[in-house]
């Protein structure tokens, strides 16, 4: 029985192989994709055509003021506000995040109240409020509250300038958002790893630096990069309180020359340049802190060029013939 069934099994396998060999594979067609691609190309070409054929764009005016002194000064103030706002946001946000993670109910609810209040009020309202704080407190004083002696006092208008209001508004608003980002990053680390670190004798500082921080940064860094980009664009709101940032400097120019659209295009190009630089830096930082992670990280363009060059150099090295190969 076994001998007679073997040829039958072989013939059936052969017939199945023949049937599979003659099968035709049809690729799925996606006409909707090609329609979408055609529409995108048509839209992109139309935008380029309109941009270069409409004389009202006044690209000559854009080029004339692109590197002018007022624009570069406004650009410097925009970058300064972005850096100061993010530093205040990260430092104060870390403190608020630790307060929210504290077992002390007073600290926990104080951190929650700060986040709830700052995130609930629009940033533009906060900027205007800080700028007009002298209407509420004409004199700022340091002393013992509830009728105690005053050690020092100063006029609010002297302290609360437009620059101070901008820094306070941007920094405090960013701190509320960074507190939630940092809190979620710390909570993403499994508590079992903290217990294991304590078991092997690591101190709290060593546990934070070697265990918590490297893993939390994978969660913290991407939204922090997005917040930095958002902060750069949000600095344009300080023009309301007369801080001479990039947008305010642009407004002063087109108020004098009546070239509104060309000047706004010029400011938009500067914002796009700065945001592109920040995006590149963010991608490199994400790849750095994602080392050892199981998730796939997209390799950047420059890294692909380096990998391709290294591969070509390796393939160009001649392979020496061994004694075993010559004998064979």
Image: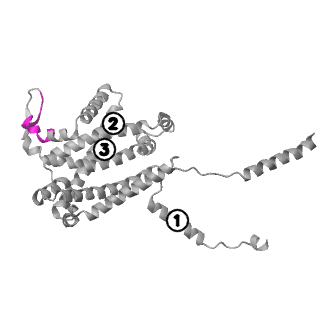
Measuring from the top left, give residue 247's x and y in whole percent: 19, 53
Q: Which residues are magenta?
A: 129-145
Q: Which residue is mark 2?
A: 97
Q: Secondary structure at mark 1?
A: helix
Q: Is residue 86 above or below residue 149?
A: below
How far apart marks 2 and 1 lie (CA) works out to 43 Å
How far apart marks 1 and 3 lie (CA) works out to 38 Å
- The circle on residue 308 is 1
If you read the primary sequence from the N terminus, does the residue marked by circle 3 or circle 2 appear first? Answer: 3
Out of 125 and 103, give the one closest to the viewer.
Answer: 125
Q: Quadrant of the N terminus?
A: top right
In this rendering, position of residue 21 left or right of residue 172: right
Question: Is residue 291 visible in this depiction of the protein?
Answer: no
Q: Secondary structure at mark 2?
A: helix
Measuring from the top left, give residue 121's x and y in whole percent: 22, 35
- The circle on residue 90 is 3
Measuring from the top left, give residue 168's x and y in whole percent: 19, 43
């Amino acid at each position: 029985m076994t001998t007679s069934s073997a040829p039958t099994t072989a013939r059936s396998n052969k017939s199945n192989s023949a049937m599979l060999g003659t099968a035709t594979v049809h690729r799925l067609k996606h006409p909707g994709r090609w329609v979408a691609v055609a529409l995108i190309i048509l839209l992109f070409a139309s935008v380029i055509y309109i941009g270069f054929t409409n004389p009202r764009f006044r690209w000559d005016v854009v080029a004339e003021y692109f590197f002018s002194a007022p624009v570069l000064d406004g650009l410097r103030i925009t970058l300064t506000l972005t850096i100061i706002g993010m530093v205040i946001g990260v430092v104060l946000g870390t403190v608020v995040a630790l307060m929210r993670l504290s077992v002390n109910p007073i600290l926990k609810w104080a951190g929650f109240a700060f986040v709830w209040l700052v995130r609930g009020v629009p940033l533009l309202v906060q900027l205007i409020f800080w700028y007009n704080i002298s209407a509420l407190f004409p004199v700022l004083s340091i002393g013992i509250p509830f009728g105690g002696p005053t050690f020092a006092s100063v006029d609010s208008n002297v302290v609360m300038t437009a620059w101070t209001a901008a820094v306070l508004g941007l920094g405090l608003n960013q701190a509320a958002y960074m507190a939630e980002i940092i809190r979620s990053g710390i909570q993403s680390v499994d508590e079992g790893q903290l217990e294991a670190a304590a078991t092997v004798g690591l101190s709290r500082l060593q546990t934070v630096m070697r265990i918590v921080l490297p893993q939390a940064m994978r969660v913290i860094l991407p939204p922090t990069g997005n917040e930095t980009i958002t902060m750069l664009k949000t600095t344009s709101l300080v023009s309301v309180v007369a801080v001479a940032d990039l947008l305010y400097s642009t407004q002063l120019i087109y108020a004098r020359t009546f070239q509104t659209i060309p000047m706004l295009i010029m400011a938009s190009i500067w914002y796009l340049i700065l945001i592109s630089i920040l995006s590149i830096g963010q991608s490199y930082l994400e790849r750095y802190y994602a080392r050892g992670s199981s998730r796939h990280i997209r390799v950047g363009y420059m890294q692909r060029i380096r990998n391709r060059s290294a591969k070509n150099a390796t393939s160009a090295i001649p392979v020496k013939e061994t004694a075993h190969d010559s004998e064979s």
